[in-house]
Image (cartoon, rainbow, N blue to C red):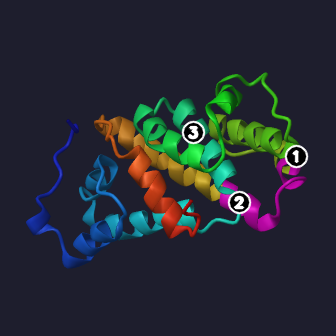
Amino acid sequence: MSRISFPDWSVLSLDTQAAVDRFPVLINSVRALTAAPTLTAPLLDLVTSILTRLEISARHREMLILLISYETDCVYEWVQHVPQAHRAGFPDEEFPLLIDEERRSADEADNALLKFARCYLRSSGCDEAHLHLLREHFSDRQTAEVLLLLGAVRMFTLYINALGLEIDAAGPELARRFAALAGQEQ
């Protein structure tokens, strides 16, 4: 059970109701956003864009989301995104890359991304050396997407943790529906 109550559907504005209806699956994190009704639509649009419209690969996106989940101890987000990570081509065998900083991927872009993300998440941003390493593998647009994804998902995981949301069993369905929205349905 959440630490705060969510508004009754009938008191939400039509815009907020429409934003929730557009989201592929009604899950607890979406319900939690309705507690801030004027922010619900823009935040759900942000989530949908992050999950469907980035230039960085879906695999890298999910690596970052799982890393943020791990770094912020957000079990809810981890459970929701494991199926999406699998669908994006990030298998269980590679999960140790997220947990053990000494592990290295055969892909240097993965290593640069994870090193940069850890620096960003553990400090108040990033230093020039880590940013330079990231930019050796990612374009300016992709670098901006990485920065915004890290900040946005971190915000969501902290909100979810603060509320103590119960885990939904919708991870596989979310993965399927967001892949379809992104035009990656298999």
Q: Nearer the viewer, mark 2 or mark 1?
A: 2
Is residue 127 in sight in this rendering?
no
Viewed as shown, does residue 118 lie left or right of 150? right
Hey, which residue is sitting farthest front in the picture? Answer: 186
Q: Residue at horizontal 25%, vertical 59%?
A: 34
* Marks 2 and 1, how far apart at CA: 16 Å
Q: Which residues are magenta?
A: 132-146
Mark 2 vs 1: CB contact within 8 A:
no
Residue 10 occupies which quadrant of the picture?
A: bottom left
Viewed as shown, does residue 149 lie left or right of 106? left
Q: Is residue 186 magenta?
A: no
Residue 82 placed where, x, y %?
Answer: 52, 39
Residue at label 3?
66
Q: Quadrant location of the N terminus?
A: top left
Viewed as shown, does residue 109 lie left or right of 5? right
Residue at label 1?
133
| Mark found first going from the N terminus, 2 or 1 | 2
| Residue 99 higher or lower than 186, as above or below | above
